[in-house]
Image: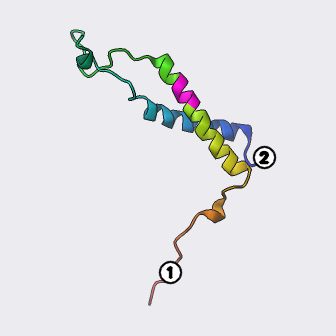
Amino acid sequence: MIFSAVSWAAVYFIVWWTTLFAVLPFGARSQSDAGDITPGTEPGAPFSARLGRIIVITTIVATIIFAGIYLLLTQELFGLDDIPFLPRFEQAR
């Protein structure tokens, strides 16, 4: 195996956390959109957060992305040699 289980867990956590911020705004309704603004709160605050639904969607999407990363790295479909680097040019003197 190319990495330890702890390394894979760290990669999954980073993918999950990044995916959370990508999924978070979908389907969000603000209090002003719903027409029910609670006094003393920001009108742009969420009307109903539905965090359970967001966590489930985030987990599904992050697992699919992580599976792709895992397959690319463990099946050697993509490696460091496949990344095009700019050539190093010597500075003229």
- In the rendered structure, which segment of residues is drawn in magenta? 56-60
Q: Nearer the viewer, residue 92 or 47?
A: 47
How crowded pointer 2 is (Cα within 10 Å; few <14, some 14-19, many 20+) is rated as few
Q: Does the magenta stretch include residue 58?
A: yes
Name the residue: 43% across, 16% down: 50
Callout 1: SS: loop
- Residue 73 location, x and y as percent? 69, 50
Q: Name the residue under label 1.
A: 89
Answer with mark 1 or mark 2, whichever residue precedes in sequence: 2
How far apart marks 1 and 2 lie (CA) works out to 36 Å
**Relative to 91, does residue 5 appear above or below in the rendering?**
above
Left or right of 65, for residue 21: left
Label total for image: 2
Residue 43, quarter of the rendered image:
top left
Q: Is residue 8 magenta?
A: no
**Relative to 64, does residue 33 appear above or below in the rendering?**
above
Q: Quadrant of the C terminus?
A: bottom left
User: In this view, which residue lies farthest toward the right?
Assistant: 1
Kind of residue indicated by mark 1: Phe
Callout 2: SS: loop
Q: Taking the image as drawn, is residue 85 in sight?
A: yes
Residue 1 got which mark? Answer: 2
Residue 6, quarter of the rendered image:
top right
